[in-house]
Each structure stands twice: as structure tokens, then as C-alpha cells.
Amino acid sequence: MTGPVLPSHGRARPLGLAQVSLTGGFWGDRQTVNATATLAHCESWMERLGWLANFDRVADGTTGPDRPGWSFSDSEVYKLLEALAWEAARTGDPGAEAAIKRLTARVARAQDPDGYINTCFGHGDQPPRYSDLEMGHELYNTGHLLQAAVARLRTSGEDDLVRVARRAADHVCRTFGPGGRAGICGHPEIEVGLAELGRALGEERYVEQARLFLDRRGRGTLRDIPLGRAYFQDDIPVREADVWRGHAVRALYLTAAAVDVAVERGDDELLDAVRRQWERSVARRTYITGGMGSRHQDEGFGEDWELPPDRAYCETCAGVASIMVSWRLLLAIGDPRYADLIERTLYNVIATSPGPDGRAFFYANPLHQRTPGKAADPDEVSPRAEGGTRAAWFDVSCCPTNVARTLASLHGYLATTDDDGLQIHQYAPCEIRAELPDGRPVAVDVETGYPESGTVRLRIAADAPRPWTLTLRVPAWAAGATLTEDGRTRQAAPGLVRVHRAFRAGEIVTLDLPVEPRFTWPDPRIDAVRGCVAVERGPEVLCAESRDLPDPAALDALVIDTRSAPRAGNGAVLVRALVPGHPGRDWPYLPDPAPPAGDAGWIDLPLRPYHSWARRGPAGMRVWLPASAPRARGE
Amino acid sequence: MTGPVLPSHGRARPLGLAQVSLTGGFWGDRQTVNATATLAHCESWMERLGWLANFDRVADGTTGPDRPGWSFSDSEVYKLLEALAWEAARTGDPGAEAAIKRLTARVARAQDPDGYINTCFGHGDQPPRYSDLEMGHELYNTGHLLQAAVARLRTSGEDDLVRVARRAADHVCRTFGPGGRAGICGHPEIEVGLAELGRALGEERYVEQARLFLDRRGRGTLRDIPLGRAYFQDDIPVREADVWRGHAVRALYLTAAAVDVAVERGDDELLDAVRRQWERSVARRTYITGGMGSRHQDEGFGEDWELPPDRAYCETCAGVASIMVSWRLLLAIGDPRYADLIERTLYNVIATSPGPDGRAFFYANPLHQRTPGKAADPDEVSPRAEGGTRAAWFDVSCCPTNVARTLASLHGYLATTDDDGLQIHQYAPCEIRAELPDGRPVAVDVETGYPESGTVRLRIAADAPRPWTLTLRVPAWAAGATLTEDGRTRQAAPGLVRVHRAFRAGEIVTLDLPVEPRFTWPDPRIDAVRGCVAVERGPEVLCAESRDLPDPAALDALVIDTRSAPRAGNGAVLVRALVPGHPGRDWPYLPDPAPPAGDAGWIDLPLRPYHSWARRGPAGMRVWLPASAPRARGE
């Protein structure tokens, strides 16, 4: 039973999903809420809105152009199927298994005899198949169907869903293969679906079709649109681009597929191109939360250094897609910085989206909310990605199902093996029971209160008569970490720390990560947060909420004393803050800088994890806090 | 011959357009370019794109749903007609007069027998009349027709254009009047058109219809849209709102009409509401350029303090609309701050849009361009409002004709009279020949090289045996201004300075405004420009362009020494700037602020007027410059 992403080779191999399980803690709890609340929540909304009935109407011949939902609503059903497949395998929950069969039956009935499957095109008075490759999302939907089938194949074997996907993939290859129509889809996804299904089924043709779609892209293959061809990455071929641009989810799904194809084809040039794009995009186009996408207008990347906190889009789905990319690069290349970014994105984007009950979600994840949003009605579809509260469902509701499939398979992202041992990338209470190709057992129980606590105890669970290497990631932020093994404690610098030994069962290796809260300063080229500081604690970015201030408007004006270190207190992290008064002004641009605030009172401002913001209700919020002593350049 | 906006009462009366003329200088030159290049340029593009032929096709019964242009393209023809009317009156140019007749004839033929006129609805297979009040722009188009007719009426008298407009206004009153359909238009404009046409024709009904439209708005009269009802100001009634929000041009056209109706109806509550909205919006939602609109997504206002320089939208049309509002408030209330904002907007938005040849325009006016745009092809329609170069024409091409009508009537905004004298609000070389209600002649020639020079000489051109009051605006930025009259020089504090005398012809009053370049600091609550400083000179905002830097990438990194005052040099304003090197970093959020740059070299960075940016070709640009010594609060 294997998990998402299974390259045929690379620096590290993912664990099978039966080889690792979360045993509670930060992520285990979220995985449980996902299983017990979110999956049913998603199915129920899609039933209510008719997105599921769209399949029935195709089967019954009663559909038409006015079907409910956007052209990509089919994909939500497929993403839910993917989530259910991981979940059914994780727990053996018969409810999940029943839901898969129920949904698969409805989907399967809607497939045309030639394998085409889509509820928005090609039936009754609907527009003809593939008549709007730019915005119609047909191949995008199919790509998600293929990913759902991959999840089923890897956890349960060939079933009706896999057969539907196989016929759909064959149809795509016939239609768009060599000699066929030289088109691509405006929203990448078919590429990663084909590459993964090809790997899962051993169908070389599917990987080759993914390569073909990739190579056609970036050459003006699609019609231009007002937002420009960069919106769907049809401006520059993927192997020539040096940075991510345009619609963030599109850019990242495409990149995930590029890694898959590069690895399967041994195409180092393509892999290098992706690596280069990752480097520049992470160094210049990524938020401190790991969030990607600076613009609401096109849900897209901004230019280098364009990272406004208030208008940050940071779509939850872009976080999912970013993890898809970095996980693939980690498997291919092994650089722990990919796992660093995965961790950052997990704690500050993925964990932020769902509310505690798993029935409301953030779509966009701004780093600054100026005015409290209005509490969303849990019975209403939210029309917009904006607003400071989580919503039950969206008009464009890609994020809930994307969070669901990620959480249901999250244990698959914790660790990998290679020929010589086990690499632990993410710290969470879990059990790992794997073996190396030569049969050496690698069995570890991870015990930790991370990220609240920085102590990670790795209890060896099986004797290993022959030595193997336990490799641990020390996050880039964790300067001062230590490793204790066999009674000795040593420094563990950020990067990778290795223990090579013949381990005995019961033996404990302890990694101590410094999770004291710390100030973090932005590169001075990020104009939008100049003179500000953020506070982080371990992998968590913290934030201030207006409800913790004596006057909510003070969120606009507060100033942090950066000479006093942040400290724990009252269940939060406290920083010293001044809330200066501002004189009424009729014009905000003046001959002198604002005068020092004098001896106005200082307060202890509590900061809490960004992922928990608005859990206490609508509030203003900010991650970047104006600093009392921003050190200036050139002084 | 009167000009745009003629209230029946108020604190000041506009001059008639025959009473004042520009005699060269900054604005006189632009008015000439507008007359000799822009007007024909606009007509030629609208002919080429079929926007004019749309009228012919309605008349011929050959139109249909697939006509070229957006639903608001008719309004461009009307705005051009308005510009031509002002221009024909200004110079008596027979070419302008002929163009008016030519365009009027084509427009008139398209009017339906009942007065309805629109090329996008109600003919052939087009959607029915008023079937999309939210986004169809039918009444918006009509509003601009009415404004064109007002220009014609006030400068030439009743003609075919006025008759077309009268029939159209009657149709609107029949359809949407008391007892008719209780609708409003998604884009305000009909209100201001009706109010002005009502004043110009003495038709009380039209003003009343404008009031009715205003009162219906803000009550959820329109269907909701994904951007929300604030987009078209149907969220809060105008007299209850306390700030401008949503689409900026819509908000401001609506507000202009609110002032007209308030003044005509003596509705002080409504006038106070507008005054309150102006105060807060100017103090918290306006750029240093006077530009309005912080968001690309909805071309709209952001929240208080949300003023990103790079993603500033600052649509040129919002600048035009802002002047419409402030001019009306100036006439009604007399506060010189309205004229301050008009001046700022004229020099930094209106003057920025057209290129020197009057055949290319900025649509959006950001305050920071990170990467040089691509030079626009003068033969191509620009699809987007983005990009760092002026374009010949746009897919949505509202700005060129809006600039044209503003420049053609600009002399009307220089001065006013009241019962006791003349008020000069804007300084430009001009001749003023007016008389007061009791017959006292007020005749002044203004001689000045403003804004390059701060010396404004006002030469009295007619003996006045009885005293009258010459009132001069001292801009808010002009601390240290002096007034010299009758051999005596005195301080003239920002605000209004008055000279009350029996003037003799030939006598000179000199206002000296300090136009040395100066640093200007933002309110600390404007997060996006924290730690930055701008340089202004007189009414002009200055900017740096990447082409003036040794390395264009230095624009991202430079730092200004604010301890050295900006000074003139090499035809520009020079500031001391450091271009620090930045170490390559793989993650831009670090435990320490960027270290001081050491003794890396300082350069003299030339700054030039923002309105001239990109005239030398595509370039990176920034108005707000990181400051070496931003003084911090709380120190």
C-alpha cells in the first residue's frame, strides 16, 4: 500500500502508507477531524448544490448548458474520492469505503462509451467537447479523476474507479496524442494525473502523454486572454522559465508534473529548470507562511519582492500544490530545504484553512486583515475568497477537498527511506515500521509534543543487528538544536543530522529543537513589510489579533519593542508593544516623520499561531508588526 | 458661455469659459496637444474599431448581439463629443465644429422614436432594453450623452445633440421616474448627467430624477455580484456612508451627482455626508499623487491605510472623477483644500496619463513599477490596464476621452468669483476678464513659469474704481510663501490670502511659492510605504527611474540619505542614495535585520516629475524611496 507520488527512482523513496501512521498530536488530531467531519461535509455540500447530480443528469440524458456549478465542479468530486481512498486505507473505515463505491457508481454512469467524461461539455445542448481549452477545465477535471484512481490503485487495487480513469486516460491519449489535436488545458492537472497513473499502472503511454502536454505549453498554444498567457503558463516553455508566475495553483500543478516527467525520463535539464524556478520563487515570491500568490486579480504570483501582507492571496490550494512540488523535489534531490518549505506550508497554510470543526475553511490566507470580517453563515455558500472568516463552502470550492486529500494522506509525507536508512522530515507523534531493500528493519516510534515542545524522542522499535542510518532534518530556523543519543549530546546544525549505528529496540534518540519565540526580519527589498518584524515559534508563524488589543483600531498603529525578546505568558507569546495615539490629520503625507510617541503606555501584546486566527471569531489580524527599532541600511 | 458645472448657488461661481483662457505654460501646452492630436486620435480609433459604426448599424437595422466594443463604448463617443464641444468653444476651431456635426448626425440616427438610444441593447437579436442594469451600462452611456449635450448647450446653445439628449432624458424619466421601474444603473453617471442637463435647460424634472436615482441606491436595489454590492455603491445609501468604497470611478461619479443634487435641493444633510466622505477618503484612502483606487481586482478603493504603491490602480478616470467632486465641493463650500486636491490630481494623475504627443495614455497610475514594461505598439489595442508604458488605445478605453474632455475645459477650473471679488485656485499663465454682479470689472493676467518656478505675477488688467477682493490659494505644502503688493511683502500662510483694494490697471500682485524640493513622510499607518520618503517639488510628486541607475536592479535596493536635503542639478532633483549590495539568500526572512551596508558608494540619484515617467521609454520607477533614517515611533 503506497501513497501519493511514487517515482521510479530518486534520492529517497516514500514510505508505504501502511508503514507509517500518525498517533495523535497536532496533525493526528487534524487527520481525525478530517475523517470524521470534513469528508462528509464535502459530500453533503456537493449533493446539496447538484454537483453530484450533474453526473446523474449526464447518465440520464437530461443535462444541458445550465447545469449547476462551475466547469470544474466535477474535479471536487474526484478530489473527494481521492481523499476517501486515502482515508479508507488509513483506517479501514467502512463508511469511507461505502462512500467511494457510492460516488464511483454515479461517476461511472456518466462516462461516454469512448471514455470521455465531463458533465459540462458534450451532452445535450452543452458546448462541444474541448471547445474551450483555455477556461473549460475539461482535462483539468480528468486529471483529478486520474489522481483519485491512483490513490485507489495504490491503496486497494484496480476497481471501477480505476477502470473509469483508465478509459478516460486512453481517451485523452487518443484525442491529444501524437497525431491528435495539439492542444493543452488552460489549467494544468492532467499532466500530473497522467504521469502518476502511468507510474501506478505501468502505462508508459500516459507518462509520454504528460510529457507531450508539458512540451506543448509555453509556446502560445492557447488563445491569449485579457490576463495574458502567463496566467496559464503558456508564455514560456517550462524548461526555459526561471521563476513561477501567473495563477499560482496552475503554475504549481504544472511544476509537479514537470518533476514527475523529469524523473521518469531522466531529464536532468527539466529537473534543473524546476530547481532553478523553486530557488528564485522561494527566495523572492513566497510569504513567510510559505503561502504563494500575491495578487487577488489573477490569483497569481506577483513580481519579485511583491509580497503585500494585506492583499496576500496565498490560496489554500496553492499551499497544497506547493507541497506537491517540494515533496517531489525532496524525493528526487534530497535537499532538506524542500522539507523545510513543506513544514512551513503545512503549519501556516494547510493548518490555517480548516476551522476546528473541519466544516469551515479559509480560501485565501492573507497576512494582514485590516477589519474584522463578518462571521460566515454556515448554511451559505460564500461568494468570495475574501473576508476574515472561514466559510462552509465557496462558489469556487476547490480548497476544502484539497485540504481533505492532503490531510488524509499526510502520514505519507513524514519520512522516507533510501538504501541505507530512514530519513525523518517532519516531526509528529507516529509509528514507522519499514524495512530497507536488504531486509534491515527500520522501526521507530516518534514521541513529541511538537510544535508546542521542541523535544522529539525517537524510540527505536526493532533491533537492527546491522547498522543503518537515521537521518533527521534540523529545520533552517533551528540554530542551536542538539541531538542526544547513547548518553551523549551534540550540536545539530540546521540541515541533516545523521546517526549511523546498529540500533537496539528501546533505544532513544532525542532531537531538541529550540522553539523559543523569535523575531524574524524581512529582506529589505520586500517593500510592503519594511520596518516590520514577525514573530515565529518553531515552525509556526505568530500573529496579533485585534481582539487582544484595548482598542481594535490600535492594530493599525501599534509598534513592537524589538529590544525585548518575545516571551511565553498567558497561553500566548507576549511582546512589548506601544499603541501610540495618532493626531487627526486631514492629509496623510507630511513634511516630518511622525514624532516619537513620548511615554504613552506600553502593553504586553499576546501573539498566537497564525493558523489559529479568527478561531475566536472575526478579528483584525497582522503577522508583520511595525518595529520600534528597524535598523536602517547605510547608517 | 459657461463651463462644466453650473450650480444655481454656492460659495463661489465658476467663470464662464469666455472669461478665462490659458496662455501657454504647463497646461496651455497640454491643452494644445489635446486639441491638435488627442481629439482626432480618439475619433480615428473609434472609427477603426467600429464603435462609431455601431450607431450606423442601429440606424440601418443591421446590428446584433455581436457588435464590436464593450457595452460602454457608446459613452466614449459621447465623451469625445463633450471634449469637442469645449474645444470648439475655446478656439472656434471649425474642425472641432465639423466633428461635432459629423458625430452628432451618426448618433442622432441611432435614436429610437421613443428617445431610447443605445447600440448594445434592444435592437435585432440584442438583449432587451434594461435587461442588465447591473453591468449593462445603458443609463451610464445616456449620462455621458447628457453631459456632452450640457457642454454644447453652455457653449453654443440648443442643437441636434441637445435635442437627442433631451429626448433621451425624457425617456429615462418616463421609464425610471415615479411610478416607473424602481431601478438604477450599475455604473453611476446618469445622475450627474441629469442634474447638469436639468440645470442647463431649467428642467426641474431631470434634477428630480437624479435625486430619485440617488435615493434608490445603497438599498440592495441591484442584484448582488461576486465582488459584492459595494462595488457599485449599492451597499449603503449615499447619505449614510462615511467613506468611499468599491469601484473608484463609480463612487466618484455618484458623489459628484450627490453634490449637484444637494446644492440644487438645499439638502445640507446630503452635502455634509459627502463632505464627511471626502475627509476620511482623502485622509486615509488617497495616494500622494491624488490618485484613488488601491486595487486592480475591482478597480476600487481599498480599506483605510491600504495604499500599496506597486499595485496602486489610480485609474486616470478616477482622477478625472475626483476633480469633478472636489470642484463641486469647492464651489459649494469654498474650502481651499478642495483646490489643493484638484491641483495635486491635475499634476500627478491627469498630466501623467497622456504622453507628449497626445496619442498614448496611462490607464492605471501605479507609484512603483518593479520591472520596465514593454513599449506598446502604437498600432495595437492594449488589452490591460497594467504595464509601464502608455498605450494608444485600450480594450476598455475610458481614459483617453476622459482626459480629452478635462483638458479641453481646464481653463474653467482656474478661478471663480463671488459677490466681492475673484478667487484664483490654480496657477497657470492665463487671462481672466470677468465682472462681478454689480458690474465691477475683475481682470487679471497671470504670468508664471509655475510649477517650475514658484513666482506667480498677477497683473491687474482693468482699473477698478471700487475695491474688490483678490483671493489667492496658498497650497497646504507652501509653508513660507509670501505675497508682494504695493511694494510690501508679507507672509502668506497656507490657506487663503486676500488683497482687498481698488486696483489700478498695470498693478502687480506677486505670490511667491516655495518650490524647493522637499521630503514628504507618510503616516505610519500606511503600511506599504513604512520607512520610505517621497520627494515633492511644488505640486509635483517626483520619482526615480531605473534608467538613471547604474544597474536597473538597484531600484529594488536603494536607500536615500534623508539627512542631505534634495537639491536641483543636471535638470533634475538630486538626492544622495546608496545602492547596497544584497547577499544571495535562499530565504528572505532571517533572524537579523539586514546589516548596515558599510562604506559602499553613495550616488547622486536624479528624480524627475512623476508625470514625466516612462517618457524616455520603459523603465522601472518608484515614488516612495526607502529612507536611511526612518525615525521610529517609541524611541
Image (tube, coloured by chain):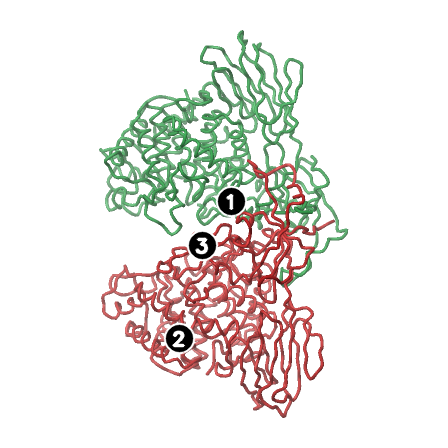
Chain colours: A red, B green
- Quadrant in which the N terminus of chain B is drawn: top left
Residue B45 horizontal/vertical position (percent):
41, 39
Give SS at disc 3: loop
With respect to residue A39, does B283 lie above or below? above
Q: Would you identify the image quadrant in which residue A125 lies?
A: bottom left
Q: Which mark is residue A84?
A: 2
Q: Residues within 10 Å of mark 1 (few under 14, many from 20)?
A: many
The residue tagged 1 is B304
Label 2 sits on what residue type? Leu
The residue at the point 48 percent across, 73 percent down is A29
**Image location (x, y in percent) of residue A631:** 70, 52
Residue A172 location (% of width, % of height): 37, 71
Q: Secondary structure at mark 2?
A: helix
Q: Is residue B159 above or below residue A328?
A: above
The answer to which image quadrant residue B242 occupies is top left
Mark-to-mark CA distance, 1 and 3: 16 Å
Tell me the crowding category of disc 3: few under 14, some 14 to 19, or many 20 or more residues within 10 angstroms, Cα based: some
| Dot label at residue B517 | none
Is B52 on the left-hand or right-hand side of A214?
left
Q: Label 1 marks which chain's residue?
A: B
Please state which of residues B333 and A308 is positioned toward the viewer in this rendering: B333
The disc labelled 1 sits on which kind of residue?
A: Asp
Q: What is the CA distance from the residue labelled 1 to the residue labelled 2?
A: 44 Å
Q: Type of residue at label 3?
A: Glu
Name the residue rendered at 67%, 55% in the picture. Answer: A562
Question: Mark 2 belongs to which subunit?
Answer: A
- Around disc 2, counting alpha carbons within 10 Å, would you say few (fewer than 14), some (14 to 19), or many (20 or more)? many
Give a yes or no on whether discs 2 and 3 share a subunit.
yes
Count of all numbered marks drawn on residues in the image: 3
Residue that sits furthest to the front in the current view: A570
Mark 3, residue position: A386
Of circles 1 and 2, which is in front? 1
